[in-house]
Amino acid sequence: MKARVFVTLKPGVLDPQGKAIGHALEGLGFAGVGDVRAGKLIELELADGTSDEAIDQMCRQLLANTVIENYRVEKL
Amino acid sequence: MKARVFVTLKPGVLDPQGKAIGHALEGLGFAGVGDVRAGKLIELELADGTSDEAIDQMCRQLLANTVIENYRVEKL
């Protein structure tokens, strides 16, 4: 089975990478670009039957820094 | 309006970051972890009525390197 983990910075956490992307888009002439936030997408190939709890543990222990990041898991 | 851009490496392109994540998960004792691919997730706040073509141009010009990366746009 496959799982996708989306890791995003929590609201209020400064995101210099997102800011840089936003400024670069403006510099390229794209109008109307507001806030930009950069996150991570991790695609995992897992053994069939891997429990939701196991995936959650992976996120908490390694994939996301839960102090500053939120994560969302999507199983395929 | 909001848009999410998912940027992933094309199949066949080496992904050392994904490999490192996979090895780290194994090292933490998670069994059955196969291929891991790392990608990017970019959340954009855009002016209402921004056309699909404009978003596509942003991806092609800045957000994704289309030589080695695929991208997918999700409008919210």
Image (cartoon, coloured by chain):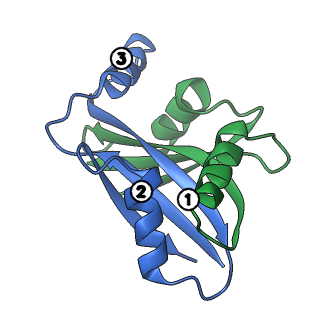
Chain colours: A blue, B green
Picture layout, residue A27 above or below residue A74? above
Chain under label 2? A
Q: What residue type is labelled 3?
A: Glu
Chain under label 3? A
Q: Looking at the picture, how far across and down is residue B55, in whole percent?
A: 47, 39
Of the residues tagged 1 and 2, which is closer to the observer? 1
Q: Looking at the picture, how far across and down is residue A63, in whole percent?
A: 46, 52
* Viewer-nearest residue: A55 or A4: A55
Residue under label 3, please give it: A26
Residue under label 1, please give it: B28
Q: Is mark 1 on a helix, strand or loop?
A: loop
Q: What element carries label 3?
A: helix
Quadrant occupied by the C terminus of chain A:
bottom right
Picture layout, residue A16 above or below residue A40? above
- Residue extending furthest bottom? A49
| Residue drawn at 34 percent across, 23 percent down | A22
Q: What element carries label 2?
A: helix
Q: What residue type is labelled 2?
A: Gln
Label 2: few (<14), some or many (≥20) within 10 Å? few
Q: In the image, is B54 to the left or to the right of B15?
A: left
| Residue drawn at 68 percent across, 79 percent down | A47
* Viewer-nearest residue: B10 or A69: A69
Residue under label 2, please give it: A61
* Viewer-nearest residue: B62 or A29: B62
Of the residues tagged 1 and 3, which is closer to the observer? 1
| Residue drawn at 42 percent across, 60 percent down | A59
Circles 1 and 2: CB atoms closer than 8 Å: yes
